[in-house]
Amino acid sequence: MIEVKNLTKYYKESHQAAVKDASLTAMPGEITILLGPNGAGKSTTIKSIVNLLSYKGEILICGCPNNSLEAKQQFGYIPEVPVLYDLLTVDESIEFIGKAYRLENYKETGEKYLEQFQLTEQRNKLAKELSKGMKQKLSMILALLTEPKALLVDEPMVGLDPASIEEVLQLLVELKNQGTSILISTHIIDVVNDIWDCAYIMNHGEIIRRIHRGEEGSETLKQIFFEATAEEE
Amino acid sequence: MRSLLFLSFLKMKGAVRNQFRTPASALITILLILLYGGLVIMAFAASSDNPMAKGTLDTNSALLIGIGMTALFAFTVMLNKRKALVFDTDAYYLFAGPYTRKQVNGYIMLQSLRQGVLYSLLGCYMIAMFSMTGYFTIPYFLVCFVVLTLMLFFFLLLTDYIYMWGLVDAKYKKWNYLPLAVAVVCTALVFFWSVYQSNYDLKNGFFIFAASREFYLVPFFGWAKWAIDGYLHSQYLFTLGGTGLLLACCLIIVVFFLRFNKDITEQAVADAEEASAFLRRAKENGGRARIEDGKVKRVKGEFAPGAKAILSKNMLIMRKTGNFLRKQDAAVIVMYFVISLIVLPDNVFYMFCYMMIIWLFTLIQDSDLLRDLNNYQIYLIPDSPLKKLVYAMIPAYLKIGIIMSVSVIFAGIFTRMAPLDIFQYLIMLLGYSLIFVAGTVLSVRILRSRANVMLESFLRMLIILVAAVPSLILGMLIILLTGMYREPALMMAVFTVISLVMNILVSLVIIIACQGMMNGREV
C-alpha cells in the first residue's frame, strides 16, 4: 500500500507550491491513477513518493517510511523518461539491478520480462543503441525485476507503440491481480480508462477530486476530469 | 536576406538574455566578465609600450602562443568528424524557407565570421595574458584581432566549403588534410632549421624559431606573424603584406563559397540534427562530450552484490570506454609539463605539481561520479547510503590517484628531483585529490539543482577550494608558530603530513555528512 499524507512540495526556483497538502492512498490489488493537466504536480508527487525530492508531509510504502531500506526493497519506479546507463547492455542492466538489490531469481524474472516485452533479441545491445520505446520497456523491466509490492509509474505509455501499450496494460492488470499497489500518473485518460480502480484528479498542485470505479454514474472519467478541472479554472 | 539577419540578431539577443535569466546566473556572468575583462585591462595597464619589453615571456613567444592556439582551434575544426553547417533549428528554417542558395550560403558565412571573431578574441586574450608586464597596447591588440580573425574566418569557411563538397562526394573530405599538411610540414621545416642553427639546443632552438624570419614562409600562420611582427617593428608595409595575403585568401574562399550550388539539403539537415543532438548532450554534461558518445569496447564484467554493484558497474563502464586514461587527459598533462618547462625552466617539477591541481578541477567536472549522481537508480538501491556513496567515489579517486601518481613520478624522474621531494609532493597531491572528490560530493549535496551548468561548475570549484582551506590554514599556522619556515626541508615535510591528515579528516567529515543524499532527496 502507498499512503501519502499532507504532501506539500515547494520548488525553490518558482517559490510556488508544486503540490499542496495532497493526501492519497493506493490500495493493494488496485490500480490508482493520478490524473491532471500538464503542470498539475503529478510527476512531483510520484518523485516525492519515491523519495527523489524533499517535501513536507508523510509518505509510507507498505507501512514503512519511504526513505527506509524496507520501503526501497518493496517498490518499483518507472520514470517518465527512462534513465538508463547507456553503456550497459540490456543483460548487464538487469544483472546490475539484480545484484544491487540482492535478488535471487533476477535471471529468471528478467528472462520472463524480456520475452514478454520482446527484447530478447536486443539483450546484447547497449542501452544507448535501443530505440525510445525499447528504452522505456527496459526501464519497466528494471522496475519489475524486484517483483515490487508497490509500483509507481510516471506517464507509462510515452514512446510506446499501440501493441506495446496493450502489453503494458495487460501486465499492470496481472500485477494488480497479484496484489500489487499500483499508482500511475498520466494525462492520457483514454489509455487507462479500462484498468483504473481509483482516480485522483490533480490541478494546480491540489487533489481536487477522488473517485472510485462505480461512483462515476452516467458520466465517463473523461467528463468528470474536464468538469473538475474546468470548475477549478 | 533581411529576415536571416534578423534571425541572427534574435539568436544573439536570446543567448545574452539566457545568461541573465536568473539573478544567480546574471551575477556569475557579470563576475566572469569583470574577472576576464579585469585581467585584460590589467594587461593593458601593466604592460609597456616598448615592443622589446621583457615580461614573463617575451613578445614573440606570447604572439606565437596566441597564433598557435588559434591554429590548434582551426585544425581541430577542420579535422572534427562531427560536422554540420548549422544547427537543426536553423537547418529546417534555412533549407525549407524561401531563400536562394546564395542567401543560405551568405548566412552560413556570417556565422563563420562571428565564430572567427569570438575565437580571435580568445587568441588575443591568450596573447594579453602571456604579455602581462610585457608589451601589449590597444593598437597592437587591434592588429592581432584583425589578423587572427582573417585567419580563422578563412579556415572556418574553408572547412564548411570542403564539408559541402564532401556531401556531394565523400572523396572530397580528404581536402581537409591538405591545409594541415602544408602548415605542419612548413612549420616543422622552419623549426628544425632553427634547432639546427642553435646546434641542436632545443631551448635556444625554440627561441630562434619564435623570432625567425623563415617562419613567415609558413602559409597563413606565418603570414599572420609577418603582419603582426611588421607592426611591432614599425614596418607597416609588412603588416599590409601579411594582412593582404590573408585577406586575399578570404576573398577567394568567399567567392567560391557563395557560388556553391549543389543539392546537399538532405545530408546537411541530417548532419545538423546529429550535431545538434550531440551538442545538447554535451551541454547537459557541462559542455564536454560524454563518454557515452565515444567508442565502446565489448567487454564483460561481474557485478558484486548490494551497494558494491555500483563499483562493479563503474569499473565495467571504464573498461568499456577506456575512460580511465583518455587521450585528452594524457594530452593535457603533457601540455602542462611542456608549459612548466617553458615558463619556469628552473622549477619545472614544482610548477608541474601545481598545474596538476588545475587538471584536478577539469577532471572532476567530467567525472563518472557526477554522472552517477545524476541517475536515480543508485538512490533507490536498498543498501546503506554510506556504502553507496563510498562505492560511487572509489572509481573517481582511483582514476585521479593513479594518473596523478604516474605523472608526478614521471615528472620528478625527468627533472631529476630527489626521491623524497617526489614522495612529499605525491602524498600532498593525493591528499588534495581526495578532498577534490569529496568536495564534488559536497557540491552535489549543496547545489542540488542542475539547471545552470556554468553556475554549477563555478560553485563546485568554490566549494572544493573551501574544502581544501582547513589543511592550508592549519599547515601555515603550525609552520609560522613553530618557526619551521627557517628550515625549508623540514617545513615541506611537516606541511605534507599536515595537509594529508587534514585533507583525509575533512574528506571523511564530508562523506559522513553527505551520506544521507544517497537516499535520494533532491536529485
Image (spheres, rainbow, N blue to C red):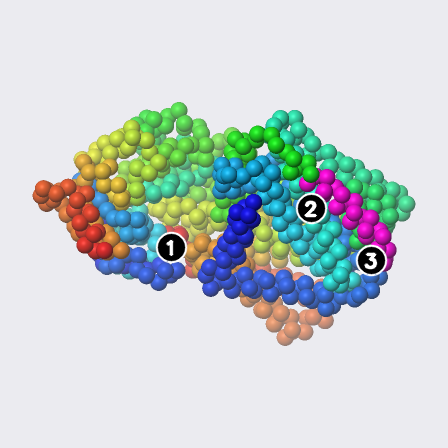
What is the x, y in percent for residue B241? 82, 48
Q: Magenta segment range?
A: B232-254
Seen at 45% across and 46% down, the residue is B372
Identified by mark 1, the residue type is Glu
Between label 3 and label 1, give the one nearer the viewer: 3
Q: Separation of disc 2 and disc 3 at Cα?
A: 21 Å
Classify 10 Å Cα crowding around label 3: few (below 14), some (14-19), many (20 and above): some
- Mark 3 lies on a secondary structure that is helix
N-term-proximal mark, 2 vs 3 = 2
Seen at 62% across and 49% down, the residue is B114
Q: Which of A8 and B494 lies nearest the eye of the viewer? A: A8
State left or right for residue B419 relative to residue B234: left
Seen at 62% across and 56% down, the residue is B357
Identified by mark 2, the residue type is Leu
Which residue was labeled with disc 1?
B522
- Which mark, by number, is residue B232? 3
Q: Chain of mark 2?
A: B
